[in-house]
Image (cartoon, rainbow, N blue to C red):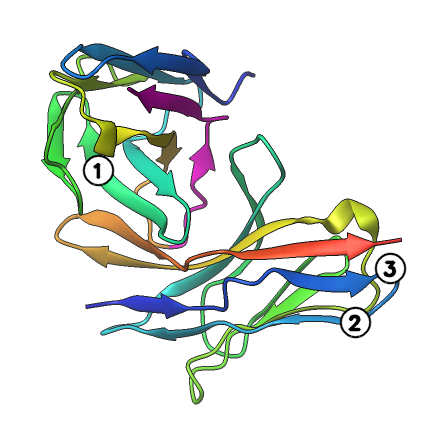
Amino acid sequence: GNSVTQMEGPVTLSEEAFLTINCTYTATGYPSLFWYVQYPGEGLQLLLKATKADDKGSNKGFEATYRKETTSFHLEKGSVQVSDSAVYFCALSESAGGYQKVTFGIGTKLQVIP
Amino acid sequence: NAGVTQTPKFRVLKTGQSMTLLCAQDMNHEYMYWYRQDPGMGLRLIHYSVGEGTTAKGEVPDGYNVSRLKKQNFLLGLESAAPSQTSVYFCASSYPLKQSTQYFGPGTRLTVL
């Protein structure tokens, strides 16, 4: 079956540091890949996505590139802010049995300190 | 445009009690989902629906039932609550394409004593 692997964290960084959160996946077909973010006390919301190999998703200074050869979708940001403190979920989506099957990673907690 | 809403936001139950969680979406999405989120386990799919009047089991369906009588609403029921069902429950909805974004509600925090 499909799976998504990411570290649970927490990842603690100082403000303005470079961020990388690794995400690797296994899938049987050609999935779409997503990063969702969950701020404290809220539901998940889409951060960025990529729908085919070599696509780059970007939003709010975050970027991730769909790498089929390494089955990865690592999240990066050049300079984090305290407001980026949240839990980040990598996810893949495939059409399976007539519905959109989404598999989530465990979530990586990011703490940014001033 | 409210997006996805969930009621209630918090609830405390005693073992054996029943309750229903309500999810509503105003985006005309075909697909709706119920997840539970537990520490160290990420999000796990409980049940889902691909359209009005249809439901199907997800990864962890035991102890839960669902109904989708109207396209915009998806109800999650616990017939006899157990402490193992203490969790945060999220509803989500989407269009029926693999590249579609899932839109999540704010969650319901349920504690079963």
**Which amino acid type is marked by label 1?**
Ile
Circle 3 SS class: loop
* Membership of B111 in magenta stretch: yes
Q: How many marks?
A: 3
Circle 2 SS class: loop
Residue to which mark 1 is pinned: B46
Residue B68 versus residue A72 in the image, above or below = above
Residue A52 versus residue B12 in the image, above or below = below
Name the side, left or right, on which A99 lies relative to A51.
left
Q: Which mark is residue A18?
A: 2
Name the side, left or right, on which A43 lies relative to B62.
right
Residue to which mark 3 is pinned: A15
Task: Write the start and end of the magenta stretch as one range.
Answer: B99-113
Q: Chain of mark 3?
A: A
Both labels 2 and 3 in a single chain: yes
Circle 1 SS class: strand
- The residue mark sitting in front, 2 or 3, is 3
Instruction: State the image coordinates of residue A46 (x, y, percent, origin top left).
Output: 55, 46
**Which amino acid type is marked by label 3?**
Glu
Q: CA distance from mark 1 to mark 3?
A: 38 Å
